[in-house]
Image (tube, rainbow, N blue to C red):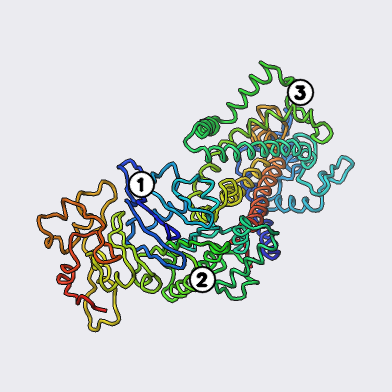
């Protein structure tokens, strides 16, 4: 119990007419103040749902949540999964904040950006509306919106996508939260704007010593900002390690496939990008065995068709490096033809 | 904004001129000769022609229309310059030979009835419809939601001529809540509010039921739709309570489109609620126009009621557009 956020065995499922959708299955991770955890995976891999559960943003009537997520607050730890909804609401925006994928639709079109930031501020601070607007201008300035004082009264539609994401960040940070969950914050933005936003999040994290969870499907984004990485597939964590371990000594065939599918500037010559064949699995009634087995190029390397009959555990392959695969690190090295200590 | 409004006002005037012109042409096509209608039993061709001249129907349709427009601004005199001349002051909508009165006088009597009926019904249906819609959305799938759905089904499928007749039957004739002889009496709501309430409450309620049902459904579905918007999730992520989210964030966006339909429904009713007025014996614009169209072929009254009705719709449209710009900043012209 030392990390700021400790998620343990968190499962989130949605009952539907076709069956129980296990969107996030027995997920555990932790992140400390000043640390950035990246959660990587394809669409539908369960990246967002566990974090929405931490924020308490799931509709309780349509969701089944089990497990725990402990926030180690100065006045004692609290499990936000089992805590009363009203208590969790009072942590939202103050201790933990979230920014979302599409800044175009995440801001209320009828209220000025200053108004929306001031609203978040006045929830936890005493002060007049004018104080709130002044604070909003301060925050807009902090997130790098030019002539912030003149723009507080502008409406979201008067800002570009990148600027709106900055507004969202300003709003999320107005009460100095300790945990920021960024759910694909750059997916809807131009590449140039993407790196600006990432840099901004990084700077602000340093300034306020926040814990940051970055949910993304973009490994380029991960490489830029993360300290640790969780790779998710089919609602489960398949690999969990520090950033260098993930990029240079990845243990799971899925992570290896992901890395192979990124275009790289340092590899000269023209060759086709390697794609992972097949489709992500349906989260209703997952087959026995490894969820990635149908798409895995190394399935034949594991003896006794173990991959299709038994689900591997998330086991520590090397110190601090967890992978959900039957293959051992040495096998991976020979199979991928990678030098063991390539850097 | 001012430029926009003045341009719209200009369009409004042009539109109303065109509406009035088409009414004159349509009336000309009706196979009924008003000149013959006002003629008594001893009708001769000469008499009919004299009548036609007196009614102002012996000139071209365009000329008739032009005289009407002039009359609107200058007032109009009917007759040959003798002592029997009739003068209707501006704005003159013409003279009804059928009712022997200036149309503007007749309209001035009928309009307060329609206006108070409309306002009363409007307040009722807005308050019932919106609050029921909010309730149904908040209790989605529960008893309150089902009950309001039942109300919506009944309200939308029962025409006012059924609800109106049932109201008259039960409230007036069976339970004697209103004296049948008082039904349809005009009472000034400012000098005699209780009297007005007695004669107007049930007509207003009859009208309101049908509209309230539509508004309930509209409010409910709008709230449910807005609740799934990303910015509502943002509001929740901020830590706002559900109450504040509903009041400040969801309702603001969900009720904005209601301003549009409410404005148009209101304007539409100002032209006269024909059926409701008929059932409760209220001599409003609706009753006036239906009688002029179906029984007396009273052109001046038809022109006046149609024109006034369409003027309300067009002007209310403008008001709604301007109001909408204040509600939704995205519509504002910078």
Q: Does B11 sit left or right of A80 as displayed?
A: right
Q: Using the rendered image, report if marks 1 and 3 lie on a common chain.
A: no
Q: Residue at x 47, y 56 (%)?
A: A72
Q: Secondary structure at mark 3?
A: loop
In the picture, residue B50 is in which quadrant? top right
**Label 3 – label 2 distance at C-alpha:** 75 Å
Give how far across and how far down residue A140 sits, in percent: 59, 70
Front residue of B127 and A314:
A314
Give how far across and how far down residue A138 sits, in percent: 62, 70
Which residue is the extreme one toward the left? Answer: A304
Q: Residue at x 37, y 58 (%)?
A: A29
Give how far across and how far down residue A192 sits, in percent: 43, 76
Chain that bears disc 3: B
Q: Quadrant of the N terminus of chain B?
A: bottom right
| Residue B35 seen in render | no
Return the mark for residue A204: 2
Q: Does A309 sit left or right of A81 as displayed?
A: left
Chain that bears disc 1: A
**Label 1 – label 3 distance at C-alpha:** 65 Å
In the picture, residue B11 is in which quadrant? bottom right
**Crowding near the residue tagged with mark 2, few <14, some 14–19, many ≥20 C-alpha atoms within 10 Å:** some
Q: Residue at x 54, y 56 (%)?
A: B238
Return the mark for residue B247: none
Q: Do the residues bearing badges 3 and 2 touch, measured as CB atoms within 8 Å?
A: no
Q: Do the residues bearing badges 2 and 1 touch, measured as CB atoms within 8 Å?
A: no
Q: Residue at x 66, y 29 (%)?
A: B278
Return the mark for residue B182: 3
Going from N to C along the chain, the mark reached first, 2 or 1, is 1
* B168 in relation to A229, above or below: above
* A113 in relation to B226, above or below: below
């Amino acid at each position: 119990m030392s990390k700021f956020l400790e998620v343990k065995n968190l499962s989130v499922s949605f009952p539907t007419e076709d069956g129980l959708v296990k969107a996030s299955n027995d997920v555990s991770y932790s992140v400390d103040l000043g640390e950035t955890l990246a959660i990587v995976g394809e669409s539908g891999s369960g990246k967002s749902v566990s974090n929405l559960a931490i924020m308490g943003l799931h509709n309780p009537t349509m969701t089944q949540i089990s497990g725990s997520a402990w926030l180690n607050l100065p006045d004692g730890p609290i499990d936000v999964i089992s805590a009363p909804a009203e208590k969790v609401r009072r942590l939202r925006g103050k201790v933990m904040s979230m920014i979302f994928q599409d800044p175009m639709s995440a801001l209320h079109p009828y209220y000025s950006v200053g108004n929306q930031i001031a609203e978040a501020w006045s929830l936890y601070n005493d002060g007049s509306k004018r104080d709130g607007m002044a604070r909003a201008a301060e925050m807009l300035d902090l997130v790098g919106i030019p002539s912030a004082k003149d723009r507080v009264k502008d409406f979201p539609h008067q800002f570009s996508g990148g600027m709106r994401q900055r507004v969202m960040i300003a709003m999320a940070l107005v009460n100095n939260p300790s945990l920021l969950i960024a759910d694909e914050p750059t997916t809807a933005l131009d590449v140039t704007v993407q790196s600006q936003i990432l840099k901004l999040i990084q700077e602000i994290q340093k300034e306020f010593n926040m814990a940051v969870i970055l949910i993304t499907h973009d490994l380029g984004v991960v490489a830029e900002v993360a300290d640790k990485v969780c790779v998710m597939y089919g609602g489960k964590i398949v690999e969990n390690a520090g950033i260098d371990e993930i990029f240079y000594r990845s243990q799971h065939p899925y992570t290896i496939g992901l890395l192979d599918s990124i275009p790289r500037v340092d590899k000269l010559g023209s060759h086709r990008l390697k794609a992972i064949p097949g489709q992500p699995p349906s989260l209703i009634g997952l087959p026995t065995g490894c969820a990635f087995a149908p798409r895995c190029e190394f399935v034949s390397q594991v003896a006794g068709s173990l991959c299709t009959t038994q689900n591997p555990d998330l086991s520590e392959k090397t110190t601090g490096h967890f992978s959900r695969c039957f293959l051992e690190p040495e096998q991976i090295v020979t199979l991928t033809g990678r030098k063991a200590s390539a850097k | 904004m001012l430029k926009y409004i003045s341009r719209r006002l200009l369009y409004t005037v042009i539109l109303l001129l065109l509406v009035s012109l088409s009414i004159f042409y349509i009336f000309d096509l009706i196979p009924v000769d008003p000149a013959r209608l006002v003629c008594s039993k001893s009708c001769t061709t000469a008499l009919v022609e004299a009548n036609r001249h007196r009614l102002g129907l012996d000139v071209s349709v365009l000329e008739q229309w032009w005289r009407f427009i002039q009359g609107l601004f200058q007032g109009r005199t009917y007759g040959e310059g003798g002592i029997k001349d009739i003068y209707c002051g501006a704005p003159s909508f013409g003279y009804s030979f059928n009712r022997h009165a200036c149309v503007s006088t007749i309209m001035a009597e009928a309009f307060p009835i329609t206006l108070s009926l409309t306002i009363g019904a409007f307040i009722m249906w807005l308050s019932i419809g919106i609050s029921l819609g909010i309730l149904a959305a908040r209790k989605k799938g529960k008893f309150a939601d089902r009950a309001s759905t039942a109300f919506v089904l009944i309200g939308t499928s029962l025409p006012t001529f059924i609800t109106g007749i049932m109201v008259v039957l039960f409230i007036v004739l069976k339970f004697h809540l209103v004296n049948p002889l008082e039904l349809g009496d005009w009472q000034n709501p400012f000098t005699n509010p209780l009297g007005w309430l007695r004669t107007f409450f049930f007509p207003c309620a009859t009208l309101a039921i049908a509209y309230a049902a539509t508004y309930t459904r509209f409010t409910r579905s709008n709230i449910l739709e807005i609740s799934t918007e990303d910015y509502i999730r943002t509001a929740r992520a901020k830590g706002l309570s559900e109450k504040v989210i509903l009041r400040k964030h969801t309702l603001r966006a969900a009720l904005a489109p209601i301003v549009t339909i409410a404005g148009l429904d209101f304007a539409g009713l100002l032209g006269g609620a024909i059926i409701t007025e008929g059932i409760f014996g209220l001599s409003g614009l609706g009753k006036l126009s239906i009688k002029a169209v179906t029984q007396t072929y009273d052109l001046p009254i038809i022109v006046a009621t149609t024109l006034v009705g369409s003027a309300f719709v067009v002007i209310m449209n403008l008001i709604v557009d301007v109001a909408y710009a204040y509600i939704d900043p995205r519509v504002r012209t910078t």
